[in-house]
Each structure stands twice: as C-alpha cells, then as structure tokens.
Amino acid sequence: MSVNLRSVLISDPVDESCGALLVEHGIPITTKYKLPKDELISELQKHDALIVRSETKVTADIIAACPNLRVVGRAGTGVDNIDLQAATRKGVIVLNTPGGNSISACELTCALISALARNVAQAAQSLKEGRWDRKLYSGYELSGKTLGILGMGRIGREVAHRMQAFGMNVVAFDPVVSAEAAAELGIKKLNLEEIWPVADYITVHTPLIPQTRNLINATTLAKCKNGVNIINVARGGIVDEEALLNSLKSGHCGGAALDVFMEEPPKNPITLELIKHPKVIPTPHLGASTAEAQQRVAVEIAQQFLALSGKSTEYAVTGIVNAPVLTAAMTNENGPWIELSKKLGQLAGRFLKGKLNTTVHSQTVGAGMQDKRFIHTAVLVGILTGQTKNGLNLVNAPTLAQEIGVELQESHVDDDNRAVVVKVGQHVIKGTVRDNELLLLALDDAVFVNGIALRDHICLYRASRVQDLANIVNVFSSKAINIHNLNANGSWLIIQTGQEVSIPVDGIDSF
C-alpha cells in the first residue's frame, strides 16, 4: 500500500534536512510558517500532506475543508495539536516520530531528577544574587531512593536505564508491559496504587489522553510519600497543576520539575504561581530542544513520508498514530493479502444489497495469519465500498462501519494452508494468495480446487435450471460485453469481464 504524495506543505519550522530529503526523492515542498487558519486551509488545497511541529493546530474544521489532505506528519512525539478523531474519520493518516526525541527528553528528565535532589537551580540563583547558602540548599543522594516511572515506552525505558546507574530502585506502571518484560530490565512492575506510597520520585512518560489527564491529582498526591518529587517532561495536563501547587504549599510534596504546562506559554495565574514556587524547577518545554533531536525528528518524518509514498524502500513507516494496522500493511508481502481481503469484502458486500445494521464475520486461516490483523480492516473496506460517500481506506473503515451499523467479528483457525474467509448472512466466501496472485477458492458450497484468479470485474449469478447458463451468455452477447472467464460450480456462475457491469437476467438471481 502506498499513498501518492504530489507535494507537501511544511507549516512549522523543522530542520532543513526534512525538506531536503523529500526534494531529493522527487516530492516538492512548500514552506510557510504561522499561517492563519483560513490561509492554511487555502494553501492545503494544493497539497496532499502536511508537516507540523506543535505550533500549527490541525483542527477538525481544517481537516474537513481540505479534501486533498492524505497525511499529517508531526515532527515530534505528541500529537495533541492534531484532531485524531477527525483525521481518522476522513481517512487521513497521522504520523509522528516516536524515537526522534527519546534521548533528549530522557536526558532532560534525568537532569531534572538530579537537580531536584541537590537543589541545583535554587542554589545557583542564590549564588548569582550574592548569597552563600550552603546549609539552606543541602540535598539528598539518589542512590537507594525509589523512582516511579509512569509509562515504559522508549523514554521511560531510557530514564530507567540511566537512573539505575545512579543506584536508584526503579518501579514502573505500564498497562501494556508485562511483569516479565519489566523484570528483564531490572524494573519491578507495580500498579499505580502500589507506586504512590513507595516512590521518592515520580516521573511521567505517557501521552495526554483521557485516561492520563490529571493522572497526578489531589487524591493521588495525598497517597504519595511525604516529600515526594514530581517530574513531568511528557505533556501538560497529565499533572493537575492546582493540586500540585497545593501539595507544595502544604509541604507534602517536596519538589517538582516541570517542562510542560497546560497552557504554553503559561498565562493562568495558578500555573504562574506554581512556576514561581521555590520548590519548583520550571523549563520552557525543552524536552526535544537539542540540535540532535531536531534534526532526528525532521529526518525521521521525511523518511516515513518516503516509505509511505513508495518513493524509497530504504525506510520504514514507524509512527502511524491513528491506524496501527497500517504499519504491518506497509510491506510487499502483505500487499496482496490486503487486495484479496478487499475483493472478498466487495463480493460479500453484494449479498447485503444495501442492507445495513448487519454482522460481517472475517476469519484468517493458517500459520502466521493471526498476526495479519489488517486483513479484517481490509475486508471492511471491501464491504463498505459503495456504502459510504466518505473517502474510504484502512484508516477510517472501522469508524465508518460503526457509524452505518456494520459490526465486524474477527476470528482465526489453524490450518496447513493460508486463507481468508468472509461470511455475510448465509453466504461464505474464501480466498487465498499464491505466488502473489489473488484466488477465489470457494463460494458457499461451490469449491474451486485450482482457484479463480481475481483479475477482472466479477458478476455473480445463482442458477437453478440447465438453460440458465445459455441465457446469461446470450444477454452478455446481446449487449456486446466480452466474457473473459466463466466458471460454473453447483448453482453458482462466476463471470469475469473487462468492465464493471451489472446485468440482470430474467428468472436468475444476480449479485
């Protein structure tokens, strides 16, 4: 699967290596910064893709007004400046650069943990103001202390590795990381309720999603150790700023280091008071602000655009945010299975005859097929072809299916041979891929041992009389439509033509 990218708009400052790499591979770019919303919409009419940092807000209105937009790339990790739901519904792929700034964000986190332990920022400011406050700014060793890491992705793991070198005991929470995987890294996995009372330092490394908004709040802070230190180099909003300020004022929270805020630049009086608190080390969102990270994310987003567009096989798509199945689908080996699944879905969709509020069963068969989850989404794309006026692809098919009442049930069975089976109502269709050729293996009780190559447009007829075949052929001949291939088995007649046609024949069921 590839996406045709005729030109790309870069609307936020990114390292020049991004544009240079795209141009080198034949993708024209336009660079325009700080565009007002109406000008951004106007400019995007000329482009298929957009690259942003954090300044440009890609809202639902902008996505709806730009029918040519196929891809939005974020040169960075967080995508809260992009309306993911609107993008997904319109079939717009959203990419980020998950590994580009990991080291930079990790190193800043470690620096802030150390600075909190030894009062580095406060002592430096005191000395600049002419005071020599050695006793006032006495600190604590990190060795032997417990670090709680919330989120064990790339950054969280890098932080753990480095702080273990300081002699810290690391505990962590991540719903998708197993206790065994954590143990291999020398980390003890705990649930949140177990972390609050044991951690001396708590650092967050999660995206800002509904489940993580105000993850650290008045209730959770009250459960923490007296003197706990909070570090946030992830996203503003994960820490409840008012609750943190109150905890600092009461003396329960011993200190905080914050690189991100709910509003940036901060204007809210509570946030401003929090920033000025003597126990807080604030930095102006510097997590990814290194020369190395800026170049890395710029190159990484360009490389993904090249892989997505098929302009280069040297790179891979690693940061699809709103359609994870696409990552697996972006390989040559999987391409034919996607096309097969779409075609089987299209054939199955004919039995619906416009009927919605139905259930579609999609089944993978054979070794390794259970990992090809994108097959079920591709079946949906086929089923929905002609059922919706929205642009339809692997990104938005599940959303659009849900909206029109089509429920997809997925399953897998083991077998010596690989195949895809689609069931709609009482009809069952089975197909496979052999030597990159798409083959129809069965339709209901009709089995095609050698398979029917799915190359041309297909007409389905269910016959009940001996003369039905002759009647069908005569109708096609009378309309000057060439039949490329004809297969008959049981009651089913499968006719392939060079053009898409729908020809009813009196007394014969057609699909």
Image (cartoon, rainbow, N blue to C red):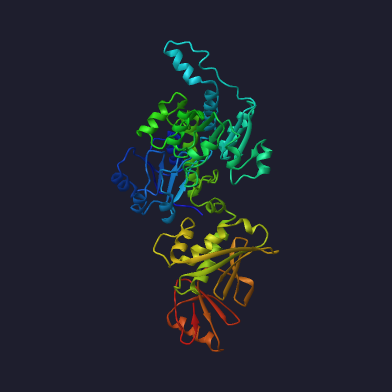
Does the image show residue 274? yes
381 w.r.t. 235: above or below: below
493 w.r.t. 62: above or below: below
379 w.r.t. 222: above or below: below
Indicate the position of residue 122 as horizontal and vertical percent values. 47, 19
Q: Nearer the viewer, residue 255 or 370?
A: 255
Does the image show residue 265? no
- In the current view of this chain or complex, which residue is farthest to the front? 250
Q: Which residue is drawn at 49% across and 29% down?
A: 256
- Specify the quadrant of the image occupied by residue 90: bottom left
Q: Is residue 251 left or right of residue 368?
A: left
Q: Is residue 481 left or right of residue 189?
A: left
How many marks the image carries: the answer is: 0
Indicate the position of residue 390 as horizontal and vertical percent values. 40, 61
Q: Which of 250 and 43 is in front in this view?
A: 250
- Specify the quadrant of the image occupied by residue 173: top right
Indicate the position of residue 204 as horizontal and vertical percent values. 53, 37
Q: Which of 215 and 297 is in front in this view?
A: 215
